[in-house]
Amino acid sequence: MAKLRGKRLNSEVYKIIRKSWPIHPSGVCRKLNIKLNVSNISKIKYHFDILRKNKKIRTTKIDRALVGWPVEIERLRILHEFIKDMD
């Protein structure tokens, strides 16, 4: 795989999050076949932050681990709760 950088890497990270949610930055590294080290995980976390800022994903911390999932899944969850309350 060619070196991924900038917008192309951001796009690939988003595709992986949409396909394999919820996922950690280290999980994205594994799927992109990037060596697992602090530097690479931090780079992927940077892209998580950009995607969250652009309102494409939601993130939360579970203990010390960051987890991300697509915004549309959050919308489905809210819709499900709304429908469930109608009964």
Image: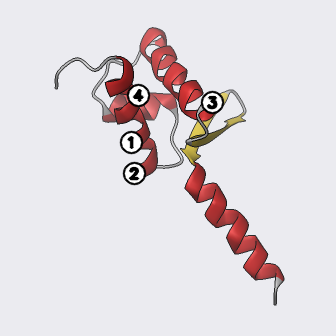
Q: Is residue 20 something that shows in the picture?
A: no
- Quadrant in the rendering for residue 57: top right
Q: Secondary structure at mark 4?
A: helix
Q: Characterize the local packing of mark 4: few (<14), some (14-19) or many (20 or more) Cα atoms within 10 angstroms.
A: some
Q: Give the percent coordinates (x, y) of residue 55.
A: 61, 39
Return the disc, 1 or 4, that comes first in the chain's sequence: 4
Q: Residue at x 56, y 46 (%)?
A: 69
* Residue bearing the label numbered 3: 53
* Residue bearing the label numbered 2: 19
Task: Name the quadrant of the C terminus.
Answer: bottom right
Q: Amino acid at mark 4?
A: Asn
* Circles 2 and 3 in contact, beta carbons < 8 Å: no
Return the disc, 4 or 3, that comes first in the chain's sequence: 4
* Circles 1 and 2 in contact, beta carbons < 8 Å: yes
Left or right, 12 with respect to 68, comes to left
Q: How much space separates mark 1 and mark 4, taking CA atoms?
A: 10 Å
Nearest to viewer (mark 4 / mark 2)? 4
- Quick check: 84 above or below 44? below
Q: Characterize the local packing of mark 1: few (<14), some (14-19) or many (20 or more) Cα atoms within 10 angstroms.
A: some
Residue nearer the viewer, 45 or 51: 51
Task: Name the quadrant of the N terminus.
Answer: top left
Q: Amino acid at mark 3?
A: Lys
Badge number at residue 16: 1
Q: Amino acid at mark 1?
A: Ile
Return the disc, 3 or 1, that comes first in the chain's sequence: 1
